[in-house]
Amino acid sequence: MQRIAKFYKVSESRFLKDWTDTYDGQEESRVREIYASLKLPKRATSGSAGYDFYAPVDFVLKPGETVKIPTGIRVEMEPGWVLQCYPRSGLGFKYRLQMNNTVGIIDSDYFYSDNEGHIFAKITNDTKEGKTVKISGGEGFMQGIFVEYGITLDDEVTEVRNGGFGSTTGI
C-alpha cells in the first residue's frame, strides 16, 4: 500500500466561521468545544479501505431529513489521487443513509483552497421503512477511500482551483 495522504483539522477560525454559517445562533464557546473534540479520520482495522469520519456532535435524522455537517477536517494528498466519501456501510444498509451528491469527491488541490479544503458532508435519511437515524458525537458516519486516477493523453489543463463546491465549473 502506498502512503499518499495526511488528514488535518482546519484552523479553529475556519471551523468557527463554517460552523456558525451552517448552524446560526450557536455560542462561540460551544463551537470551540466542538472543535477541540474533533477526531481525525482513521481506519477501523488493518484491512479497512475506508477512513471513518466522526460526527462532531450528536444528530438525529427522521425519514426524509437532511443535515449538512462541517467535519472540521481537511486532507493533503499526492497529485493523481482523490478521496471518495460515502456513508458508512452499516448506516447505508440499515437506514439507507445517502450522501446528497451520491459520492463526495475531494480532489488533491482542494487542500489549497481559500476555505482550507474544509470537507463538508451533506447526508439524507432516505429510508423507505420509517427509520430514524441517531448518530452520537464521535461516532463514525462517513468513510473516505483514496483512489488513484488517470487523465487522457491529450489533457493540457493548467487551471488552478480556488474554492469549494462547484468551483471548478463555476456552479
Image (spheres, rainbow, N blue to C red):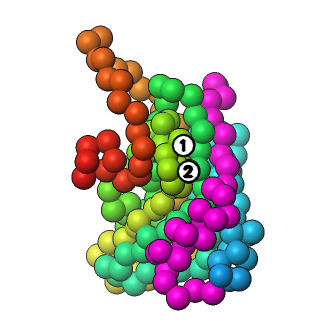
Vertically, is 122 above or below 41?
Answer: below
Q: Nearer the viewer, residue 65 or 109?
A: 109
Query: Is 23 colored magenta in this rendering?
Result: yes
Residue at screen point 32% across, 56% down: 101
Identify residue type, mark 2.
Answer: Glu
Residue 83: x percent and y percent? 49, 41
* Magenta-highlighted residues: 1-27
Residue at screen point 42% across, 74% down: 67
In primary-sequence order, the first of circles 2 and 1 is 1
Query: Is 85 colored magenta in this rendering?
Result: no
Residue 81: x percent and y percent? 49, 30
Residue 7: x percent and y percent? 65, 46
Quickly name the residue at label 2: 116
Residue 20 appears in view: yes
Residue at screen point 66% across, 29% down: 3
The reply, left or right, for residue 141 in relation to residue 61 is right
Q: Quadrant of the N terminus?
A: top right
Vertically, is 52 above or below 127?
Answer: above
Q: Check if mark 2's residue and mark 1's residue have beta carbons within 8 Å.
A: yes
Q: Callout 1: few (<14), some (14-19), or many (20+) C-alpha neighbours within 10 Å? A: many
Residue at screen point 33% across, 62% down: 100
What is the CA distance from the residue labelled 2 to the residue labelled 1?
6 Å
Quickly name the residue at label 1: 111
Label 2, secondary structure: give it: loop
Identify residue type, mark 1.
Answer: Phe
Most extreme residue toward the top is 153
